[in-house]
């Protein structure tokens, strides 16, 4: 009987061995497969990529003189005497300057005064045509912000050159604030007075 007992003990031991081997191989294969898949995802070859993709900078770009503007408005039939080609000077700023003129004058009361100010305003940018597109698109909101700045301006400020320069800076900041809120980017460099009347 002892021989029979020894034979019985040997058989179960042999039966467990292949099952353990299969389990070990399966676990190793799962680990390798999972690790390989993780590596492929991290490299961006499959799935959404492990590293957070850097967001492309899609803000308006500074344009050097002579650079084409991919966002420039299409030229309407040129006026007589215009060659149709833009010519840039070689001196001064290295950047192209584009101007936007607001369609209507601005009229507002001055702060703590019975006087009114009436101004015609334009602004400029050294960036591509998207800034011009946005100014036109959001002109109503921009006008409202600019009128608020004018209404918060004391009469003494508009009577001096220094005061007008401060007002220009405040108007530029107001325009850029609206564009930043609406489009995520300002881009206006300066404000200019085409006419300025205090009554």
Image (cartoon, rainbow, N blue to C red):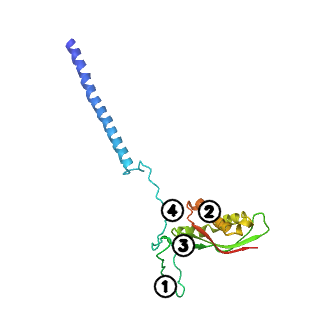
Find the residue positioned furthest to the top: 1
> Label 2 to label 4, Cα distance in Å?
18 Å
Label 3 and label 4: CA atoms lie apart by: 17 Å
Q: Nearer the viewer, residue 175 or 30?
A: 175
Report whether 189 appears left or right of 44: right
Real-space Cα separation, disc 2 to disc 3, in angstroms: 18 Å
67 with respect to 111 (left or right) = left
Q: Nearer the viewer, residue 82 or 40?
A: 82
Query: Which secondary structure lies at badge 3?
Result: strand
Per the image, the residue denoted by label 1 is 83
Circle nearer the N terminus (2, 4):
4
Q: Quadrant of residue 124?
A: bottom right
Q: Nearer the viewer, residue 150 or 14?
A: 150
Query: At x 59% / y 61%, what residue is drawn?
Result: 182
Mark 2–mark 1 Cα distance, whole angstroms, equals 36 Å
| Secondary-structure class at tag 4 | loop
Q: Nearer the viewer, mark 3 or mark 4?
A: 3
Residue bearing the label numbered 4: 59
Tell me which label, 1 or 4, sits earlier in the chain: 4
Label 4: how many residues lie within 10 Å, few (<14), some (14-19) or many (20+)? some
Q: Which residue does the numbered mark 3 point to in the structure image?
A: 98
Establish if 131 lies above or below 21.
below
Q: Earlier in the sequence, mark 3 or mark 1?
A: 1
Q: Position of residue 1 (x, y in %)?
A: 21, 11
Locate residue 33, reporting x and y percent: 33, 42
Q: CA distance from mark 3 to mark 1?
A: 18 Å
Nearest the eye: 187 or 30: 187
């Amino acid at each position: 009987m002892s021989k029979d007992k020894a034979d019985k003990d040997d058989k179960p031991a042999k039966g467990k061995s292949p099952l353990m081997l299969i389990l070990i191989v399966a676990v190793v294969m799962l680990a390798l497969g999972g690790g390989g898949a993780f590596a492929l995802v991290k490299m961006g070859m499959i799935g959404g990529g492990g590293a957070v993709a850097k967001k492309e900078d899609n803000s308006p770009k500074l344009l050097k003189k002579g650079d084409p503007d991919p966002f420039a408005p299409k030229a309407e039939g040129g006026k007589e005497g215009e060659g149709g080609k833009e010519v840039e000077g070689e001196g001064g700023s290295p950047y192209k300057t584009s101007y936007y003129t607001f369609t209507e004058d601005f009229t507002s009361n001055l702060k703590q005064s019975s006087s009114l100010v009436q101004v015609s305003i334009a602004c400029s940018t050294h960036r591509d045509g998207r800034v011009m597109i946005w100014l036109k698109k959001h002109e109503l909101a921009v006008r409202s912000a600019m009128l608020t700045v004018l209404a918060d301006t004391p009469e003494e400020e508009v009577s001096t050159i220094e005061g007008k320069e401060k007002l220009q800076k405040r108007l530029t900041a107001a325009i850029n604030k609206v564009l930043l809120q609406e489009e995520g980017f300002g881009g206006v460099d300066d404000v200019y007075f085409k006419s300025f009347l205090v009554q």
